[in-house]
Image (spheres, grey):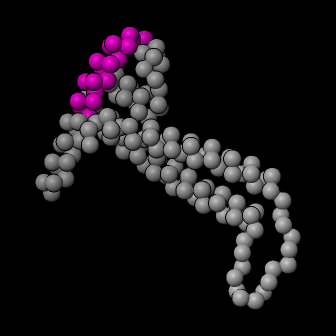
Amino acid sequence: MIAKEYLSQALLLDQRIHIKLEHLTSLRALATKMSATLRQDKVSGGNTSRSRMENAVVKIVDLEKEINEDIDHLVDLKAEIRETISQIEDPIGQVVLEMRYINGKGWDDIARGLRYNNRSVFKIHSRALRNVSEIKKRAVKFSKGQ
């Protein structure tokens, strides 16, 4: 996995979580519009069917569980990425990578925040990515060596 793909994992997971949260909001809206159907169920046969409301609640609970698992994974992933970024010797390179891959900032925002032009930010970013690649290579060599 190249450095950019490694660092982008958190952004992609964050986007997936937001998509799931939007879906959860729409499911909840649909569930509040449903009315409970009161009926007398047959006891024979043991085949109990759920109402539409029950199905909606089950889907909501399942999606909430999935979102919480994704959030836990995102927190762990961001901590791992931060640890990798902290190993870069250039503090400006660290800031650029954190702003881009941890905070999800755009290039213009990063340049404005650092008071650099975009070209300078791109150079710093490129150099920092090469550093991350080296850090990851060393980590792989170290883990294979043991």
Residue 131 within the segment the image draws in magenta: yes
Whether the magenta-drawn stretch holds residue 110 is answered as: no
Quadrant for the C terminus, please: bottom left
Residue 141 sits above or below residue 90 on the image: below
> Image point 70% across, 86% down: which residue?
46
Can you see residue 86?
A: no
Between 89 and 96, the residue placed more toward the observer is 96
Looking at the rendering, which quadrant does residue 88 occupy? top left
Residue at the (28%, 36%) spot, across then down: 3
Query: What are the residue bounds of the magenta stretch?
Result: 114-132
- Tally of marks: 0
Find residue 83 and report its horizontal and vertical position in percent: 34, 40
**Left or right of 24, for residue 9:** left
Q: Where is residue 122 in the image (x, y as percent from the top left)?
A: 32, 19
Residue 72: image location, x then y, percent: 49, 52
Q: Is residue 144 above or below residue 127?
A: below
Q: Which secondary structure dominates the residues rendered in magenta?
A: helix
Q: In which quarter of the image is the N terminus?
A: top left
Horizontal arrangement in the rendering, residue 60 relative to residue 1 (left or right):
right
Residue at screen point 70% across, 60% down: 56
Q: Position of residue 38 (x, y in %)?
A: 86, 70
Left or right of 92? Residue 43 is right
Between 23 and 91, the one lying in front of the other is 23
